[in-house]
Image (cartoon, helix red, strand yellow):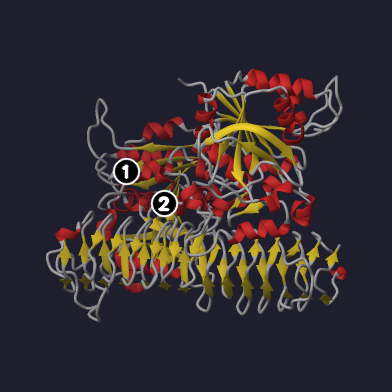
Amino acid sequence: MRNAEDALVLLLAGGVGSRLNLLVEKRAKPAVTFGGIYRIIDFSLSNVMNSGLTRVGVLTQYKPLSLMSHIGMGEAWDFTGRTRGVKILPPRTGSKDSDWYQGTADAVRRNVDFIEVNDADEVVILSGDHIYHMDFDAMLEFHRAKKADVTVGMMVVPMEQIHQFGAGITNDDGRIVDWEEKPEVPKTNLASMGIYVFNRNYLLRSLARSGNEIDFGMHILPWAIENDNVFAYPFYGYWRDVGTIQAYWEANMDLLKQDGSISPERWQIRTNFEAEDRQADRPAARYGVSARVNNSLISAGCVVNGTVLNSVLSPGVVVEEGAVVKDSILFRDCVVETGAEVDLVISDKVTRFGANSSVGLGDHHDIVNRLYPKHLYTGITLIGETARIPEKMKIGRNCIIKCNALEEDFTAPVLQDGESLT
Amino acid sequence: MLKPTTLAMILAGGRADELNVLTYYRPKAAVPFGGFARVIDFALSNLMNSGIEQIAILSQYRSYSLINHIGTGASWDMIGRFRGVSILPPFIDSEQQDWYRGSADAVYKNLDFVQYHRPEEILILSGDHIYQMDYRDVLAYHHEKNADLTVVCKRVEKARASRFGMAHLDHEDGDRGGKLINYQEKSENPEGEWSSLTVLCFKPEVLYRVLEENQADGSFEFGHDIIPRLMRQGSRIYGYKFDGYWGYTRTVLEYWNANMDLLGDQPIIDLERWGIRTNLDHRGLRDHQPALIGKDADVRNSLVYNGCVVEGTVRNSILFPGVHVSPGAVVENSVIFFSNVIGRNCRFNKLISDVNTIYEDDVQIGINHGDSKKQIAVVGWNNRVPAGIKMGRGVTVSPELDRDKWPGFLEAGRVLR
């Protein structure tokens, strides 16, 4: 017998996340690998599961196939059964609509039928882009206690970062009295996490007001704050929007710290082990006689005969004897051949680093990537999936190597800092 | 053609006394193996990879352990319209009140199940061994020869033969197989040099008949009774010659040796290549994050699954999911099962440690030699070993001991209950 108080969840997973560059060339941001075996969306999905919520609509748009395959029928998060379910909701043509989702509120508005079909008192709206652990049940209790129309999950961020977020000012009771979306000059450092709890009927009425209100943060929320009851639910704890290469890298490296700030296992984050290609379902990792591994996260299925320091390896990564991997993140089934050195690199899956190649060479972390200066500027070199780095090839800092790069694509034995093979 | 023609039956009822504490609470087939899997996963994975999708598992000893591990069978793709794995424990009915009296008796008692599936071949195999085999090769040979029974065999040197059912095969098909000319079970000086691996392929009518006849005997084993009976009747019996790795797990030492075959830069047991799968829902395998190897850790020639946190030294060892090795601890030549916690500065050599055991700081096991014939120490599950205890080589410790049972020192070979 379904619990009538079981809120409906809408997970916005359509975004491009373009600053992740090659990592989102073929997949949506929520589908990007994280922490070896996870995908970013696993955090939101698992938080939903662990909060006891069982009905989820996932709104996709940009390159959703990888995501859809990963979610499957939802069995990995227990979203299967008579009264449970996860539904993929892509943009679709109908007799009236024939457009892509134009914004967060627009996407939800186009799925009003899904909301209407699923009886619930509240609708929880969140994105699939973030690394965090949260109990939505507690947020729902707060929402009900305050008799709010809308509750926004909010947290304190450093003043210099607030311009990336929706920012709110609250009174003593937690009511939001003022709001600015991505303010240039902030009045507050309380940031919206993009997590909303709406009373269901209030949401439907808000969406019905005008088709021009396409964004929650810019349109729906300011109107609600002005006219109705909007409260801020305070969040304390680890939360990261891994929207840039640097932020993504740092969050992965945070997993290596044992200071308790982030632990997918303790947070009970679950992933789909049986998704296509059985990506995470492997035997135990094998460490060879000459292996030297320190301060690293090693997934099942890896075979390490060389050196791995301060790195995160996804399943099936092979590090041959004499190879060195440092400060890097390697997605599944990469092979680092003997004598190769991989330093401060993020590599997508199934890439091969030829023997004695040096990727991430030199000290010029400050020479930014020429084509994408706003993406790579801290020294990280980015390699696309299924690339083949030739033997003895030297690649500098802040470089980009395209997906499926072949050995003959490399016309010189050295790729300078900041250069790209596109 | 959708409906499968082969029914496979796995014999998984046995306990194996020699595995002592490892089989107190589970049958031999459910003993953990390979850093993440169970012994029976080899038979199951081989069946899956051979495209055989209708399976029965004959259980007896502590069936729950197997039931829990098999789950729906989805882990080995054995779920679907004509796919399935059924566990068949002993039962009481209006006519009989016995446990299974032997492997042949177990199959006999379940003939209604077998005949319901109307198989064209019946594959009977033990669930206790470590190997990779494509059973389709065996089935193909069986059909080519129009055999009543095909017995998979492996060459074994005479010195070890007294333990096995030994077959004398002719050279009819060279390295592939031959007709069974003679068969002797556990003989001191057998004529044959091919050991039966308890992988048997039967023509159904032959099996039904011989099992019925066998019920009048006093003993009900395939090796000891069924094969000799069929031989005496002049049945068409062929031996299929297998030359791959075959790992036994009947004693603690055998089990430990087989585990060590997982290690080395070119391991003899290649879990990835063999396609071994396990049930990721059993003991929460799927809930573990990748292994965290600490700043001062030293991990070499070992297997480590997800969920482990290694801050000490691990050499020539196998760590199952969720094992925590504290700073300063040294684990060598050991097999540590799920969720063990190993305290600071512990030193282990040649230990098998069962599930959920906690070792407080400074515990030493197997460091001093003694003259015990038992080489491998075994500590039963759910123990909490007090700090500073020293245990010699080859000790055996029962599961779940009370704290006051522990002396400060256990000499080599000692059994602690």
Q: Marks 1 and 2, Cα distance to the nearest angstrom?
A: 12 Å
Residue topped by disc 1: A64
Q: Amino acid at mark 2?
A: Ile
* Left or right, residue B8 beside residue B380: left
- Residue at 22% from the left image edge and 78% from the top image edge: A366
Q: Quadrant of the N terminus of chain B?
A: top left
Q: Which mark is residue A132?
A: none
Mark 1: amino acid: Pro
Q: Quadrant of residue A399?
A: bottom left
- Which residue is at a point 37% across and 58% down the rendered structure image? A331
Outermost left residue: A411
Horizontal relation, residue B148 to residue A225: left or right: right
Residue highlighted by disc 2: A41
Residue that protrudes farthest toward the bottom in the picture: A363
Rendering quarter of residue A343: bottom left
Image coordinates of residue B255 in percent, x first then y, are: 67, 56
Which residue shows up at 63% across the image and 46% down it?
B129
Q: Residues within 10 Å of mark 2 (few under 14, many from 20)?
A: many
Q: From this viewpoint, is residue B305 visible?
A: yes
Picture quadrant of residue B122: top right
Image coordinates for residue B200, horizontal then vertical, percent: 63, 33
Q: Secondary structure at mark 2?
A: helix
Q: Is residue A413 left or right of residue B344?
A: left
**Quick one: B375 or B278, which is closer to the camera?**
B375
Residue nearest the viewer, comparing A165 with B59 = B59
